[in-house]
Image: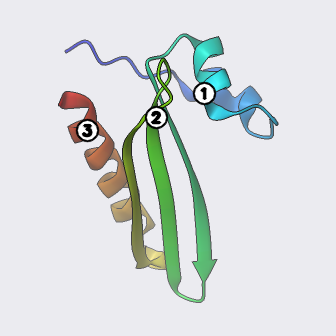
Amino acid sequence: DGLIVRPTSAVLKYVNADQLPLVIGRELGVDAVLDGSIQSFGERTRVSFHLADVATGSVLLGDKLDAQSQDVFALQDAISDRVYQCLLH
């Protein structure tokens, strides 16, 4: 309850922006912003990500996950679950 996620269409204009994630978060009027990177090498994929409080800039969650390239959906689900659990607490 009370969790609102901005639609992809609202954030697409920031894909190649040079703005900091916290500045983008303030423009969007959100409480937290998720930022990350993806690296692939051979059959392996690593996603590093952090969730930051827009008001304070503090990191609420920082993590990295590794998976086989064919498990990309499982990786996406794992990230979503970790972010959701962080926001619940």
Give the quadrant of residue 29: top right
Residue at 60%, 27% in the rendered image:
22
- Give the residue number, with chain letter if any, for mark 1: 22
Q: Can the viewer see residue 4?
A: yes
Give the quadrant of residue 16: top right
Report the front residue among 38 and 55.
Answer: 55
Report the front residue among 76 and 39.
Answer: 39
Q: Earlier in the sequence, mark 2 or mark 1?
A: 1
Badge 1 amino acid: Leu
Q: Which mark is residue 52?
A: 2
In screen coordinates, is 61 left or right of 46?
left
2 shown above or below 18: above
Q: Which mark is residue 74?
A: none
Q: Earlier in the sequence, mark 3 or mark 2?
A: 2
Residue 7 point in image, percent of width and height: 53, 23
At label 1, counting other C-alpha atoms closer than 10 Å, the crowd grade (few under 14, some 14-19, many 20 or more) is many
In screen coordinates, is 44 left or right of 77?
right
- Give the residue number, with chain letter if any, for mark 3: 86
Residue 10 point in image, percent of width and height: 63, 20
Can you name the residue that lies furthest to the bottom here?
42
Badge 2 amino acid: Ala
Residue at 69%, 31% in the rendered image:
12
Look at the numbered discs 1 and 3 and tell me whether their residues touch, using CB distance below 8 Å: no
Look at the numbered discs 2 and 1 and tell me whether their residues touch, using CB distance below 8 Å: yes
At label 2, counting other C-alpha atoms closer than 10 Å, the crowd grade (few under 14, some 14-19, many 20 or more) is many
Residue at 19%, 29% in the rendered image:
88
19 shown above or below 76: above
Residue at 32%, 41% in the rendered image:
83
Residue 14 point in image, percent of width and height: 73, 31
At label 3, counting other C-alpha atoms closer than 10 Å, the crowd grade (few under 14, some 14-19, many 20 or more) is few
